[in-house]
Amino acid sequence: MRVLAIGDIHGSLRPLDALLDWVNPTPDDLVVTLGDYVDRGPDTRGVLDRLVGLRDRLNLVPLRGNHELMMLKARDGGRGDREMWLSVGGVQALASYGTPGRPGTFRSVPAAHWDFLETGLVDYHQTDRFIFVHATVLCGFDLDEQPEYALFWEYLPPAMRHHSGKTVVCGHTSQRSGEPKVVPGAVCVDTHAYAGGWLTCLDATTGRYWQADNAGRRRDGRVEYEA
């Protein structure tokens, strides 16, 4: 069984499909998506359609990201919440639900997508060797004690050695270099998929990674974790 982690997708369906075709995960693999499926890229709707479908045929664990939280808050909150979300990629997300001559609205979002965002995501996942989280963890706290700001909002620190001794696999801190970032105790695979960067799928056990971008390019490499 492979343990695969896919970084922040941000509406980038083309590289997601390219990675799925290349890596070819099977039901025997564990596939953890690290959150931030929506906003910024051109096809939030297509990405959510794909993930909803993948749940039926893969061992998929979709994590919750801060952009999913913002999208839900924009729908349910006040004008300030909507303006905040629209300013960080919500405009592109809603546009993906539009039709020719008609802009997308919250009512355009299918019920299956809202259900996925509200009830289909988890805050973190762990195996015997790895912790998967969108943003960060506080290293001295168990996972069920982690505050929301750490799980969804904090950026990658110089080191993140969780007291469990497990390696943390995370996203959120966008690596404009396009390369996964390794620090002692953790590896970040948000490689700026939506803006000329790469979408990354990491085999957490071996350190091999595969990348695809919106231009149709592919490349692969390997990371070694720091102790």
Image (cartoon, helix red, strand yellow):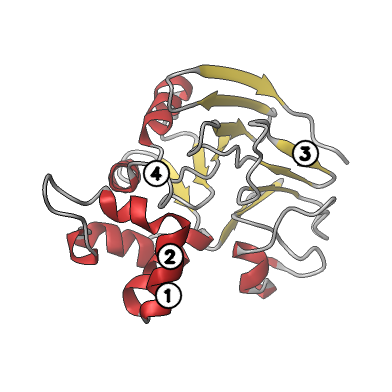
Residue 200: x and y, percent? 56, 33
Check if mark 3's residue and mark 1's residue have beta carbons within 8 Å.
no
Check if mark 2's residue and mark 1's residue have beta carbons within 8 Å.
yes
Give how far apart the Cα atoms at labels 3 and 4 are. 25 Å
- Residue at x 24%, y 58% (from the top left corner): 112
**For this view, does 103 lie left or right of residue 163?**
left
Q: What numbered label is drawn on residue 85?
A: 2
Q: Earlier in the sequence, mark 3 or mark 1?
A: 1
Give the secondary structure at mark 1: helix
Give how far apart the Cα atoms at labels 1 and 4 are. 20 Å
Write down the residue under mark 3: 182
Q: Judge whether 10 appears above or below 118 on screen.
A: above
Q: Earlier in the sequence, mark 3 or mark 4?
A: 4
Say whether residue 1 is visible.
no
Residue extending furthest left?
A: 101
Write down the residue under mark 1: 81
Give how far apart the Cα atoms at labels 2 and 1 are. 6 Å
Q: Residues within 10 Å of mark 3 (few under 14, many from 20)?
A: some
Q: Earlier in the sequence, mark 4 or mark 2?
A: 4
Please, what is the three-letter code of the amino acid marked with disc 3? Val
